[in-house]
Amino acid sequence: MSDKIAHLDTANFAAAVAGATPTLVDFWAPWCGPCKAIAPILDELATELDGKLKIAKVNVDDNGELAAQYGVRAIPTMLLFKSGQVADQYVGMMDKTSLKSKLAGKI
């Protein structure tokens, strides 16, 4: 996994999404096949969009309270945060081109 992707938990979540740079948070679990499939795409985007977008991950098995707080019912769910507020939500596996185009107008 890219060193540009932060791992968040209840202790560091609020500070991580509060900044001026938009943050895409991937809610995932180690046993989730689609989560494993999208991970390399997020790694690539973390490098390609460095400076424009931060990417972070929340393991829902370890941080169920965060998943519940944001209404995550299916994984992978990716929430785009701008200044600490949810700006958009993407649910399920998608290819890199689709995800990048969805993000393009938001970052």
Image (tube, rainbow, N blue to C red):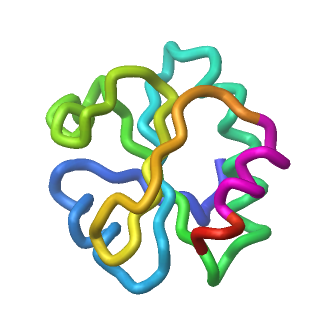
In the rendered image, which quarter is residue 47 located in? bottom right
- Residues drawn in magenta: 95-103
Residue at image position (66%, 69%) is 105
Residue at image position (26%, 30%) is 62
Q: Is residue 104 left or right of residue 65?
A: right
Task: Indicate the position of residue 36 as horizontal and vertical percent values.
Answer: 64, 26
Task: Indicate the position of residue 25 as horizontal and vertical percent values.
Answer: 45, 52
Task: Indicate the position of residue 29 as horizontal and vertical percent values.
Answer: 44, 24
Residue at image position (80%, 37%) is 95
Q: Is residue 30 left or right of residue 50?
A: left
Prevailing secondary structure class for the magenta stretch in the rendered image: helix
| In the image, residue 96 above or below residue 63 | below
Task: Indicate the position of residue 70 as horizontal and vertical percent values.
Answer: 24, 42
Magenta segment includes 101: yes
Q: 71 or 54, which is in the foreground?
A: 71
Magenta segment includes 93: no
| In the image, residue 75 above or below residue 107 | above
Q: 60 or 3, which is in the foreground?
A: 60
| In the image, residue 15 above or below residue 56 | below
Q: Is residue 20 left or right of residue 48?
A: left
